[in-house]
Amino acid sequence: MVVGNGKMNLSSEAEEGGLKMLLKWAAEHGVEVSESYSSLGLGHSLSVSSFPGAGGRGVAALRPITKGDLLLKVPKSALITTRSLLSRDETLSVALKPHPSLSPTQVLTVCLLYEINKGKASPWHPYFLHLPRSYSILAAFGELESQALQVDYAVWAAQKAITKAKYEWKQASALMKELKLKPPLLSFRAWIWATGTISSRTLHVPWDEAGCLCPVGDLFNYAAPTEESDSFEDVDNWKNEYAKDDLDMHHSQRLTDGGYEEDAAAYCFYAKKNYNVGEQVLLSYGTYTNLELLEHYGFLLEDNPNEKVFIPLELDMHSLSCWPKESLYIHQNGRPSFALMCALRLWATPPYQRKSIGHLAYSGCQISKGNEICVMKWIAKKCDAVLKEMPTAVEEDKSLVHLIDKMEEYENPWEWVKEASAAFGGEYGNDNILKAACVVGRDEEPSTALVRTKMLIDRWKLAVQWRLVYKTVVARCLSYCTDIINSLSVQ
């Protein structure tokens, strides 16, 4: 599954017109683009195309592309960084000096809003026009969407992201007022938009911790890296696969598809695989769980090979484990992680035996058939309890996602909101959706209220999709543990 970088909320004609303006601007700033009647080209190898159901607008191969081919170069002069913005504007540079406590990301956020405040006077104006009008990152969630995640650690992550965004906005408000930004750009809503732009679109550069915005380079859609296969047949394979758990940080560096190159003075993008003509060319930002994708990029993957699901563990399980808590998880295919199995095998061992046979647990070996059955029964029982404690079941969530998808069939989404409230109980009853939508649209023009209501429902759908994936993985784990128990019991 591939996912795009945000929603434009524009007509297709307006979007194509804006895209042509962006590519014309890119050509003037040293990005290699080409003109053709049939496509909007990037050099002689790529074109900007539409991929319905596979990320929306994306980049297609115009010719066969070989793994390792240079796809695109964006000159340093076209990149947007704090340094490039400060070097062009003395007022901005002087205003920033009395605010040393702001983080690099806060500074870039303020700089972005300040540059947008210039309108057509900004050299990056065509790029700004092309940016999404909204993002569904966790910091943009409201109470309805946050609670819709249902799982405690996910709800907490959303609340933490919202609190952090509000704190950083308040910290930067004095500076933004000193810079005399227009009132709409001083709002928390504008701050969330700028935060979403930076969180979801910046790329790493060695000279700026906050990264850079890369016009045209952010047209590629995302696909999760798949090098870390989780299909294994036995415990020996577990050891080989799970030994990779603690190397995610190293892998994320290897799995990216581009970087800034000093000798070229440009951000360069390379093909990670071979592509045929017409095939969508994708980039990998690295390995992310669905919750991390939601937090930083505002989307998730239904079939994410890097997904990690956490279930509640006993306190003494953590104390017995030498691995960090984030290593004790369930893989997307339903199998417990190497670290989780080691910790549970040790936990299920009598205290007086742990010292003498602990090395077996730490090496990933099965201690005994009885120990393995005990561990699998504990995990199965915990997974069953987690599913039963959820406010909604898997099938209910599937039905709800289907109903949300039908919203586009309604000319008036308010009618859809009423139907959704009537069709589902719990969080959807008592007109909770309707109330949330009314709060969103309060004191606004009908057209603006309509757009913002749709945005709320889009975020709500993402929350439902996240918990659906969570429950599906937990159910897979329950099934897997049951199969192992049955297999060991007949031996």
Image (cartoon, rainbow, N blue to C red):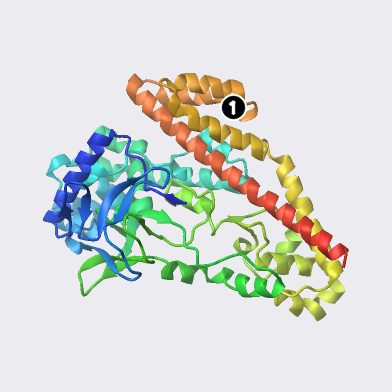
- 403 or 184, nearer to the observer: 403
Residue at the image point whose x is 57% and y is 23% from the top: 421
Residue 38 image offset from top left, x and y in percent: 21, 47
Residue 191 image offset from top left, x and y in percent: 34, 42
Question: In what element is the residue under mark 1?
Answer: helix
**As shown in the figure, which amino acid type bears the numbered disc 1?**
Tyr
Say if 207 sits above or below 149 in the image.
below
- Left or right: 379 in relation to 218: right
Residue 258 image offset from top left, x and y in percent: 33, 66
- Left or right: 79 in relation to 254: left
Residue at the image point whose x is 33% and y is 69% from the top: 66
Q: Is residue 298 visible?
A: yes
Residue at the image point whose x is 31% and y is 53% from the top: 59
- Left or right: 348 in relation to 203: right
Say if 318 sits above or below 116 in the image.
below
Residue 64 image offset from top left, x and y in percent: 30, 64
Residue at the image point whose x is 71% and y is 70% from the top: 234
Figure quadrant of the C terminus: bottom right
- Left or right: 146 in relation to 94: right
Check disc 1 and report the residue beneath it. Answer: 428
- 33 or 202, nearer to the observer: 33
Report crowding for label 1: few under 14, some 14 to 19, many 20 or more residues within 10 A (C-alpha). many
The part of the image, by quadrant, that contains residue 317 is: bottom right
Say if 201 sits above or below 375 in the image.
above
The part of the image, by quadrant, that contains residue 217 is: bottom left
Q: Is residue 126 visible?
A: no
